[in-house]
Amino acid sequence: MAESELELKSPPNPNSLIVSAPPSTPPESPPATAGSRPIWLRQRPKIRVTTEFDSDSSVFFHRISCKVLDSFAKLKLSFQNNGKGEISDPQLALSTKYLSLQYDIEEKNALVNASFGVAPGLQFKAAHDVKSQQGELAMVADLAGPAYKFELSSAYPSIGMPRATVKFPLGEVSLQEKEEEEEEEQAKRILSVNGILKGNILNGVCTAKYSDETLDLRYCYKDEQMAFIPSISLPSNAMSFAFKRRFGPSDKLSYWYNLDTNYWSTVYKHNIGKDFKFKAGYDSEVRLGWASLWAGEEAGKAKTAPLKMKVQFMLQVPQDDITSSSLMFRVKKRWDI
């Protein structure tokens, strides 16, 4: 029945029961909570805003980013501005798992990078500069597992043979062509071999790096309390060594010395909990002493710092002119909107 009350057509019987339907009322809407937001606002992607300021250059650096297309891509806008409010170096970037595009608004130039697998164990990479019409193409193939790789890359427009690189757990070796100028000012293309090898020797790690006919040898011995790192460069025979000593979980001293120039430097570090670090040091090459205090993990991101903000104060004291000492600071702050 459409009526709100059920009635009998005959006269009512005193022994009968009359049933009445409750009055129809619209359903009550759930109470609004303080944290509830409109649907359109809940569907909006989260925006991350990061601002950085360096008192030495008096320049603000800003980054605004968010994930779009249901987190399929990331959109980022970055720019700088000085104390007068003048904006410079605006950059717009769009990145996905396989493709990234970076556009320089002032230069009106775009850099495109792509990387994707074309077959199991075979990957294709490409980089292109739109304004200069130059770039690089590369193919990377797995050899006997992902720990062994062979990469063949070539710049375009192509000038010579492509560069071939073999990567393995102990290092990598590459073969490429390069130009060598002769006395008659004519360029001659020759094959060049570059590479790096690592291995464990005498409870330490020895590294040999060969590039442009220069061999750099480095040995690193390290335990829980000490590290000793001598190095030599051939054929110049330039030698140096570094020494690091840990006095506890919060204190560490580092020392570096160059035997050819007699220049040396030292750094002392003291951690105060996880979010505070004090550092002090001296560099004989520039004759400068300095001290700095970090609030927020130095190597971490602003996201993990208290209030999502990192601050560094640094005092520089020139040895030759103490009166020209300067106090500088850097601030990095992140907002999630």
Image (cartoon, rainbow, N blue to C red):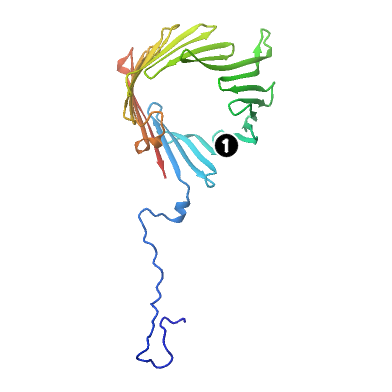
Residue located farthest toward the front when viewing the structure as drawn: 15
Residue 123 placement (x, y as % from top left): 63, 32
Task: Identify the residue position indicated by label 1 in the image.
Answer: 100
The correct choice, above or below, for 56 with respect to 18 in the image is above
For the question of whether residue 323 can be seen, the reply is yes
On screen, residue 125 versus residue 105, left or right, reads right
Residue at image position (62%, 15%) is 193
* Residue found at x 54% / y 34%: 106
At label 1, counting other C-alpha atoms closer than 10 Å, the crowd grade (few under 14, some 14-19, many 20 or more) is: some
Examine the image and state in which quarter residue 100 appears.
top right
Where residue 203 appears, as percent x and y from the top left, is: 46, 15
Tell which of 224 and 129 is nearer to you: 224
- On the image, the x and y values in percent for residue 142 come to 63, 28
Dividing the image into 4 quarters, which one contains the C terminus?
Answer: top left
Identify the residue at image location x=39%, y=93%: 11
Give residue 21's quadrant in the image: bottom left
Q: Amino acid at mark 1?
A: Ser
> Residue at left 38%, top 81%?
20
Secondary structure at badge 1 equals: strand
